[in-house]
Image (cartoon, rainbow, N blue to C red):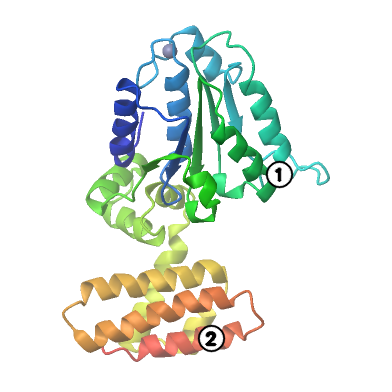
Amino acid sequence: MTYPWLEPVAAEFAERLRGGRMAHAVLLSGPAGLGKTELARAFLASLLCLEESWPACGACRSCQLFGSGAHPEGHVLSFEPHPKKEGELRKELVVDQVRRLTASLQLTNTVSRRKAALAYPAESLNASAANALLKTLEEPPGDAVLVLVSHNPSRLPATVRSRCQGLYARLPDSEVAVPWLVQASGRQEVEAAMALEAAAGSPLRALRMLEEDGIGAYRILAEVLDDLRSGQRDALAALAALADLDPELLWSWLSLRAASEIRSRLGEGSLARALARLQLEADRNRRLLATPVRKDLLLQDWLIQWSRLSA
Ligand SMILES: [Zn+2]
């Protein structure tokens, strides 16, 4: 069931499970859009499975209960409905959730040998929730395994991080991701490669872009940037063509385009330096979006610099 790029992580998990080296807390981290949470659910199923196998057998009583979301020893902690805002989820994991989890970890098992809990995104634990969790990590109930999932582990308290056994998911090489995307989306290789670039290397985000036709906007951006450099469009025309794009997305794409050009022009010293500067500026300008700067002027200036790069 695992995505090909997660196989090394799954193999590491399986080895720890087989060798009896599973810690009480595991932190599965890596960039967003790789399927880490899905993998962590499969970890839970396997930890609870009566066969204790990786992957879980899928047939035993534990697997059936876990599949229906009713396993008494399997717990999932994530964003809950907001108590005051109808139809919205909370934006953080709160201490009540951790307390409820801790209480259920004290109960006697009725199905599986272990208890297993998943918490995601772990970086969204607020300070008091992280503190409460830390207490559980310091004195873990004998049979429990807690799996934390995070794509921003640096935002977790170091005290929590240091109590966890790490597992890392990495972005796949395009040699792995592009063929997978072609197969999953049924699209051409050139489109798959472009979507992967627009998604900063995340195959699941790229797949979503292909499915929702979100790649059209990236293609327009790529065309506009090519036109600027060949002189077929000036910066004002380019500004107009990009006016509808979400600014946050736009700056991260401009950074990606610059990075991709740098990679293909490594031999050409001054051009590569100019591109590297433009990439840095794109990243800086994206951060400036939250401040009261003239965003249109920033963008116009960037596009003018791009159009002046020697072709
Ligand atoms: Zn099973």
Whichever of callouts 1 and 2 sits on the residue coming sooner in the sequence is 1
How much space separates mark 1 and mark 2, taking CA atoms? 35 Å
Q: Residue drawn 41% across and 78% down?
A: 280
* In-image side of 90 versus 188 (left or right): right
Q: Are marks 1 and 2 in contact (CB under 8 Å)?
A: no
The answer to whether 92 is drawn above or below residue 139 in the figure is below
The answer to whether 214 is drawn above or below residue 84 in the figure is below
Most distant residue in the right direction: 84
Residue 271 drawn at (x, y percent) = 25, 86
Residue 19 in view, yes or no: yes
Q: Quadrant of ligand 1?
A: top left
Q: Quadrant of residue 70?
A: top right
Residue 217 drawn at (x, y percent) = 47, 65
Q: Residue drawn 41% across and 86% down?
A: 233
The answer to whether 303 is drawn above or below residue 4 in the figure is below
* In-image side of 251 versus 195 (left or right): right
- In-front residue for pair 92/249: 92
Quarter containing the C terminus: bottom left
What secondary structure is marked by label 1? loop
Q: Quadrant of residue 254?
A: bottom left
Residue 257 drawn at (x, y percent) = 36, 71
Quarter containing the N terminus: top left
Tell me the amino acid under the disc marked 1.
Answer: Leu
Mark 1 vs mark 2, foreground winner is 1
* In-image side of 241 versus 76 (left or right): left
User: Where is mark 2, residue-wise?
Assistant: 298
Tell me the amino acid under the disc marked 2.
Answer: Leu
Mark identifier at residue 89: 1
Most distant residue in the front direction: 139
Residue 306 drawn at (x, y percent) = 38, 85
Mark identifier at residue 259: none
